[in-house]
């Protein structure tokens, strides 16, 4: 087929179908379609999935020059504000704002959150983490300046929520959101989680780089649980009778498994952070014993199996 004929086919589609198509793209790709023609400049604004991610809009080269970085951030925030102003009347399903060092833009962030609440979005991303933070050790509490307003905790339409680098965040306030199925918390102090897990209908839980976790049990009906580089106090017990995917990476703590699925489709353990902290021949007997207990307690001793078990080289090195 002649490429020009294919182009005509796309051009002849009604706007309603084009909007459905671009809504399946990432927001970055959606914005890029505005360069195709004058028609697309209006079509792309009708996407129902909106995600303003700083790293998608700023060239990597600007980070090397502080002045260029400041100017690029100002241009990014101005673009976000103008974009939102132009779509005030149209429905939105997904809305996200991801920007580091948010202190200067608290008023803008507040207005964007209010916009998402007015639209009664189904999926919401509020991420203000610093890309330089790689574990909970790096999280600077002084940079946590955004507070989640009560309107988000009351947003009954939410099905998916991601919160990163916010202060005074209280997951227990999400307990009454009956449609909420997917949650992700990252780069902040995370306390009061157990009441939320006990009463909610969440099926997927992700916790990344969180500090001062004050709970000793992860209990609920989640089918997928992923925990990465978090600060447990001493130990943690998993009570997940329906879990199908279980992933953990980070430091080694005392983990116990109670009332877990008999067959878990996917289990993944990554303790490479321990390998980075040890010399080549400095893996301790204690670590090997704890890791062997971890696997035995989850699988053999618990009478359970994993369809797929993925482990890091460090775990194999100290267990063999």
Image (tube, rainbow, N blue to C red):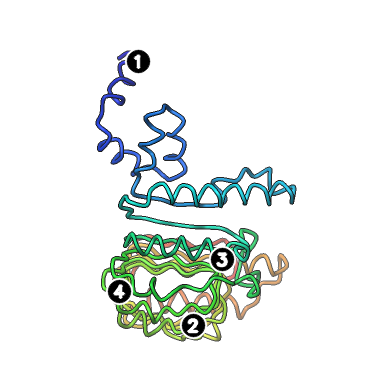
Q: Number of labelled discs? A: 4
Ranked by sequence position, the earlier of labels 1 and 3 is 1
Q: Earlier in the sequence, mark 1 or mark 2?
A: 1
- Dot 3: few (<14), some (14–19), or many (≥20) neighbours within 10 Å? few
For marks 3 and 2, give the CA distance: 24 Å
Residue drawn at 46 percent across, 47 percent down: 83
Q: Secondary structure at mark 3?
A: helix
For label 2, the SS is loop
Badge 4 element: loop
Q: Could one spot residue 165 in this view of the protein? A: yes
Give the foreground label among 4 and 2: 4
State yes or no: discs 4 and 3 in contact (Cβ < 8 Å): no
Alpha carbon separation for disc pair 4 and 2: 18 Å
Task: Determine the image quadrant of residue 4.
Answer: top left
Which label was assigned to residue 191?
A: 2
Quadrant in which the N terminus is drawn:
top left
Report the residue marked by disc 1: 4
Give x and y (percent) for residue 134.
Answer: 62, 63
- Above or below, 249 against 58 in this view is below
Name the residue tied to disc 3: 106
Left or right side of 295 for 13: left
**Dot label at residue 177:** 4
């Amino acid at each position: 087929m002649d490429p020009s004929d294919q182009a005509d086919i796309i051009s002849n589609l009604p706007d309603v179908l084009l909007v459905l198509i671009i809504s399946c793209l990432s927001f970055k790709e959606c914005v890029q379609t505005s360069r195709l023609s004058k028609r697309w400049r209006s079509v792309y604004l009708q996407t129902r999935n909106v995600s303003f991610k700083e790293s998608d809009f700023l060239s990597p080269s600007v980070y090397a020059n502080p002045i260029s970085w400041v100017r690029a951030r100002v241009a990014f925030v101005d673009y976000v504000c103008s974009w939102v102003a132009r779509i005030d009347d149209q429905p939105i399903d997904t809305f996200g704002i991801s920007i580091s060092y948010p202190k200067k833009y608290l008023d803008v962030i507040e207005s964007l959150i209010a916009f998402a609440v007015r639209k009664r979005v189904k999926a919401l991303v509020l991420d203000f983490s610093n890309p330089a933070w790689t574990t909970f050790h790096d999280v600077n509490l002084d940079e946590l300046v955004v507070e989640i307003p009560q309107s988000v905790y009351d947003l009954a339409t939410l099905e998916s929520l991601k919160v990163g680098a916010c202060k005074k965040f209280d997951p227990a306030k999400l307990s009454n959101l009956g449609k909420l199925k997917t949650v992700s918390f990252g780069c902040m102090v995370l306390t009061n989680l157990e009441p939320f897990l006990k009463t909610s209908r969440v099926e997927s839980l992700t916790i990344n780089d969180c500090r001062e976790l004050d709970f000793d049990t992860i209990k609920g009906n989640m089918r997928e649980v992923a925990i990465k580089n978090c600060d447990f106090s001493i130990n943690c017990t998993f009570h997940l009778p329906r879990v199908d995917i279980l992933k953990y990476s980070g430091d080694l703590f005392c983990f116990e498994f109670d009332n877990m699925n008999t067959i878990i489709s996917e289990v993944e353990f990554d303790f490479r952070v321990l390998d980075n902290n040890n010399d080549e021949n400095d893996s301790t007997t204690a670590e090997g014993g704890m890791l062997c207990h971890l696997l035995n307690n989850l699988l053999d001793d618990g009478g359970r199996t994993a369809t797929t078990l993925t482990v890091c080289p460090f775990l194999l090195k100290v267990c063999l």
